[in-house]
Amino acid sequence: MKNPIHVAIDKYRYLVSSNSPQIMNMSFVEYFDSPYAEDNWMTRALTGKLSSFGGEVRSLSQDDLDSAIEILSQKCLVGLYPNLHEFLARLDNYFHWELQTRDMKKCRESVYTKAYDEYTKSLYPEEGSDLWRVVFKKNRFDMQLFRVAEHLFEDESVLSFKTAENSN
């Protein structure tokens, strides 16, 4: 999971760079004040309330956030972008994956390095800045969900991830 503020900003940058006619001439603030800016994508995805691009936006409630938190905590192994290496190791352990060849290990490291480099080299507004607050306002449920995910990731670090076949 990636910080929802970063996800929203990355989407704006993508739309501008792809010359999306509705977005390419909008400023950052104009975009986030427009109906084109998604809000609370993860909460919507987990609760089945996604809307189409520029389409009808269904409102979210505290009950939706509570449902999303329940789904995340009961049905998901949580991975956080800044901890991608650790999360991949947890998946290896859970699924008993073993990278057997040097090429497999090299491929994994290449994917990890590319994703992590992209994440760390992106420029995001400082937390608490005016731009940060503009995006936060549209993604307040996802930010709460992300904070829960950070705690779940920590909690999962002590689990042994026993599978059904070896838990007897």
Image (cartoon, helix red, strand yellow):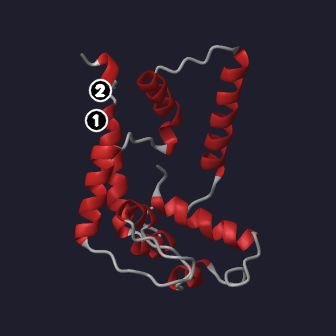
Q: Residues within 10 Å of mark 1 (few under 14, many from 20)?
A: few
Closer-to-camera residue (111/91): 91
User: Crowding at label 2, few (<14), some or many (≥20) Cα neighbours within 10 Å?
Assistant: few
Nearer-the-camera pick, 91 or 83: 91
Secondary structure beneath dot 1 equals helix
List x then y, in percent, for residue 15: 68, 71
Q: Nearer the viewer, residue 127 or 42?
A: 42
x and y percentages locating residue 33 in the rendered image: 51, 84
On the rendered image, what quadrant is the C terminus found in? top left
Query: Can residue 162 be seen by looking at this rendering?
Result: no
Residue 95 rendering spot, x and y as whole percentages: 45, 25
Amino acid under disc 2 = Val
Instruction: Please state the horizontal and vertical placement of residue 79, each as a whole percent of the image.
Output: 44, 41
At x 39%, y 42%, the residue is 78
Q: Quadrant of residue 44?
A: bottom left
Residue underneath mark 2? 158
**Do the residues bearing badges 2 and 1 touch, measured as CB atoms within 8 Å?**
yes
Q: Give the labeled residue for mark 1.
A: 155
Which kind of residue does numbered mark 1 sit on? Answer: Asp
Residue 107 lies, with reference to residue 152, above or below; the image says above
- Give the answer, above or below, for where 145 lies relative to 40: above
Question: Residue sitting at 50 percent across and 73 percent down?
Answer: 38
Q: Specify whether 117 is left or right of 159.
A: right
Please tell me which residue is depicted at 26% across the width and 60% down the height of the picture. Answer: 67
Q: Secondary structure at mark 2?
A: loop
Instruction: Determine the CA span between mark 2 and mark 1.
Output: 6 Å
Image-based side of 93 in relation to 12, left or right: left
Outermost residue toward the front in this view = 165
Tell me the number on the disc at residue 137. none
